[in-house]
Image (spheres, rainbow, N blue to C red):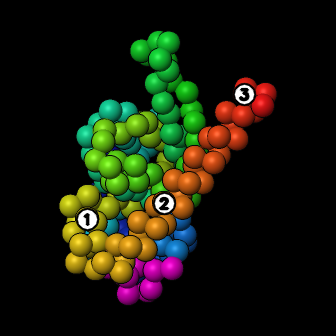
Amino acid sequence: MSRILNSLSKAQVAENLKKAVALTKSLTDVEIAELADIAVTEAYREDEVMLAEDDSGRDVYVVVEGMASVDMKLAVAEDSGAQILKVRKNGVVGEFAFIDGARRSASIRIIAPTTVVRFPFAALNGLCDTNPALGYKLMRNFAVLLAQRIRNTNMELRAHLHL
């Protein structure tokens, strides 16, 4: 189970967020500070499941240290799964559910001791509503991230299908 860490100051969280370009590209220092104000820092141990496929949560996460695996269940067996992506330092997860409100499309399993910054949905959504410029930039960054992931998936599918 995760634990909330109080060891990172808001300034340290902001510095870490600046490195997470997939989330914070084109955000001003003030906007990054606003994100840091709503962030919750958590730590996970190796082999913990940070997010479970089909869960209803909508929080967004940035990996500050460590590494996680994005795993999906296979249709052929209920208890089998496949790693579809490794999320390393400064990586972002949770953007699908944040955007569309659907259940989690994959599980996030910790593969090395990991610290994350979590953005609770209500707080992040509220920040986007009260600061439309920041909200626009975040949504644009999410769109770029999703486009990259879809493009990578297409390339892997092509390789597997020998196209």
Report the residue marked by disc 2: 143
* Tag shown at residue 160: 3
Q: Which amino acid does label 1 sit on?
A: Asn
Q: What stretch is highlighted in magenta?
A: 26-36
Front in this rendered view, residue 97 or 1: 97
Specify the principal SS of the magenta part: helix
Q: In this view, does 51 lie above or below 92?
A: above
Image quarter of the N terminus: top left
Q: Cα distance, mark 1 to mark 3?
A: 38 Å
Report the residue marked by disc 1: 125
Mark 2 Cα within 10 Å, few/some/many (few <14, many 20+)?
A: some
Q: Extreme right residue here?
A: 162
Q: What residue type is labelled 2?
A: Ala
Q: Is residue 44 above or below residue 84?
A: below
Residue 4 location (% of width, % of height): 29, 57
When asked about the image quadrant of residue 41, the answer is: bottom left
